[in-house]
């Protein structure tokens, strides 16, 4: 069913609902930004931005990686440092993360409203913009949180080049892939998806434009290459796993595919849904947090049924026909269904080859594709006699999502200070072995103070220690050999 004219009553009503949901989601995100905390990964990122903004020193490599070495390229120094020129606060860079999310959603909404029906546009706003996974990752500083914009650019650039190659979309497509490479290793999901979609006739790239865009985006890699020649330790070979581990052991592959379903539901990771309301209560929370955590895990897991049914419905629509090249006369809706299918298959390929077990953040840049099956399935149900049930379900789901988001903002580990037991499983505040003006001038110690000046403890990997300290380029760890990371 083609979308209605923009001036039709249904389209006008849908647009009004979409903007209301957008305003609610934006308000909650801004509230979460104000409450966001600074953990180990955030300190490493802020140190890079601080050195650029305060000293003019550009660190050419990114954060320490869990598999060893440092992320290639200095784009993270720029992304974190530029906002600090405008506002000396640790939340300045987080506002840029939120801006990336806003831009990504506006691109997706503007692209999809030409294809899907008005009710489905509202569904997408509900399942993507108000998605608790996306909201959680929209309001604190972390590498994967930037990637939502690149996922949106991927869908848009593929769709506008369905029939013919175009210079600027391909330019942005190539630039986006290379920039995403410098931010997080999960960029491979977009690379594989691009390849599969091209092979199946879903888009026609302008190769020259894509190469030019990629080369320009690779400029931050030039200083990194010079530093790498001087200090090979910044690219330590990974000592974990092997290619094809997910396919051999099966569980890592299944775990990754389960995240595809969970992204389109409210079945949050236990690291997100580990609630403690000590901040709210003003005293140690021994009962409310654990009770809410246990109750919501059971209730929210039930929402997995919706993406499961939607994906089964989508795959049954064409069966083996999905593996054929896209017919030139195929509708835009068929194109969109195929985009979701081939993005899923790209994820399966990457999960199979991954040398490590897939974690909850490692497929976030495909969240937009993961919610599409539910949008299309529920939209199809809404054109049957089940329409009243679908509309009632949408209202209930929206209320439940908003309530869950409020709970996350008040009690989830990344958005609270109190309730962190140094020996507890949700702790990411480690004692620091020195002090630095950055902690005070960016308001880190005012938001939630770190224990400082404790010899032998952890320290951000590029930040000078104390006044006039010496910058180190090794991977910093806590006494147990771990890098303190965000949940």
Image: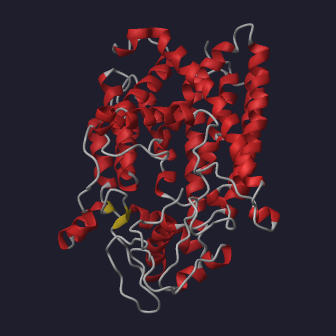
How far across and how far down the image is residue 423, in percent? 56, 67
**Rendered-image quadrant of the N terminus:** top right
In this view, the residue in front, 92 or 239, is 239
**Residue 411: x and y, percent?**
71, 56
Query: Does residue 277 appear to the left or right of 209 in the view shown?
Result: right
Give residue 9's quadrant in the image. Answer: top right
**Residue toward you, 104 or 329:** 104
Q: Is residue 159 left or right of residue 220?
A: right
Residue 126: give x, y in percent of width and height.
68, 34
Q: Residue furthest bottom?
A: 468
Q: Is residue 132 left or right of residue 171?
A: right
Residue situated in front as seen by the camera: 456 or 287? 287
Farthest top residue in view = 385
Res 190 → quadrant? top left
Q: Position of residue 222 (x, y in %)?
A: 25, 63
State the image quarter where residue 284 is shown. bottom right
User: In the current view of this chain or complex, which residue is farthest to the left?
Assistant: 229
Q: Residue at x 45, y 41 (%)?
A: 363
Work out whether residue 153 can be spotted: yes
Give above or below for 284 relative to 371. below
Q: Residue at (72%, 39%) from the top-left corner?
A: 401
Residue drawn 47% across the image and 26% down it: 340
Numbered disc total? 0
Q: How is the image coloured?
A: secondary structure
**Considering only vertical position in the picture, is 219 above or below 376?**
below
Q: Between residues 314 and 204, which one lies in front from this camera angle?
A: 314
Q: Quadrant of the C terminus?
A: bottom right
Residue 8 shows up from this direction: no
């Amino acid at each position: 069913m083609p979308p209605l004219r923009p001036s039709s009553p249904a389209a006008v009503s849908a647009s009004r609902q979409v903007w209301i949901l957008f305003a609610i989601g934006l308000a909650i995100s801004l509230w979460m930004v104000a409450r966001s905390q600074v953990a180990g990964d955030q300190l490493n990122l802020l140190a890079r931005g601080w050195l650029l903004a305060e000293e003019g020193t550009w660190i050419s490599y990114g954060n320490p990686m869990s598999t060893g070495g440092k992320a290639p390229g200095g784009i993270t120094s720029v992304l974190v440092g530029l906002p600090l020129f405008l506002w000396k606060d640790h939340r300045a860079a987080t506002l840029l993360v939120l801006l990336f999310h806003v831009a990504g959603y506006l691109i997706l909404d503007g692209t999809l409203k030409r294809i899907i029906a008005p009710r489905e546009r509202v569904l997408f706003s509900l399942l993507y913009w108000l998605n608790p996974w996306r909201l959680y990752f929209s309001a604190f500083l972390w590498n994967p949180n930037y990637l939502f914009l690149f996922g949106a650019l991927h869908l848009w650039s593929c769709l506008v080049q369905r029939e013919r190659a175009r210079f600027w979309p391909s330019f942005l497509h190539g630039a986006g892939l290379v920039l995403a490479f410098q931010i997080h290793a999960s960029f491979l999901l977009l690379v594989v998806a691009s390849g599969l979609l091209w092979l199946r006739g879903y888009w026609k790239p302008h190769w020259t434009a894509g190469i030019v865009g990629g080369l320009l985006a690779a400029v931050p890699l030039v200083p990194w290459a010079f530093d790498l020649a001087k200090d090979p330790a910044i690219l330590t070979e990974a000592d974990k796993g092997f290619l094809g581990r997910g396919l051999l052991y099966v569980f890592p592959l299944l775990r990754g595919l389960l995240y595809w379903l969970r992204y389109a539901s409210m079945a949050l990771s236990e690291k997100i849904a580990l609630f403690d309301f000590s901040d709210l209560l003003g005293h140690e929370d021994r009962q409310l947090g654990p009770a809410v955590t246990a109750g919501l895990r059971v209730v929210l897991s039930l929402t997995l049924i919706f993406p499961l049914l939607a994906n089964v419905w989508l795959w049954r629509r064409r069966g083996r026909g999905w593996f054929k090249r896209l017919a030139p006369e195929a509708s835009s809706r068929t194109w969109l269904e195929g985009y979701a299918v081939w993005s899923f298959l790209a994820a399966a390929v990457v999960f199979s080859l991954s040398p490590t077990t897939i974690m909850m953040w490692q497929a976030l840049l495909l969240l937009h594709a993961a919610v599409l099956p539910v949008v299309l399935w529920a939209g199809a149900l809404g054109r049957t006699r089940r329409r009243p049930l679908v509309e009632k379900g949408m209202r209930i789901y929206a209320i439940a999502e908003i309530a869950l988001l409020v709970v996350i903002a008040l009690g989830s580990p990344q958005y609270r200070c109190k309730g962190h037991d140094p020996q507890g499983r949700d702790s990411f505040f480690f004692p620091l072995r020195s002090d630095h003006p950055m902690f005070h001038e960016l308001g880190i110690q005012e938001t939630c103070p770190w224990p400082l000046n404790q010899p032998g403890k952890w320290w951000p990997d590029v930040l000078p220690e104390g006044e006039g300290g010496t910058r180190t380029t090794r991977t910093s760890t806590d006494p147990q050999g771990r890098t303190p990371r965000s949940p």
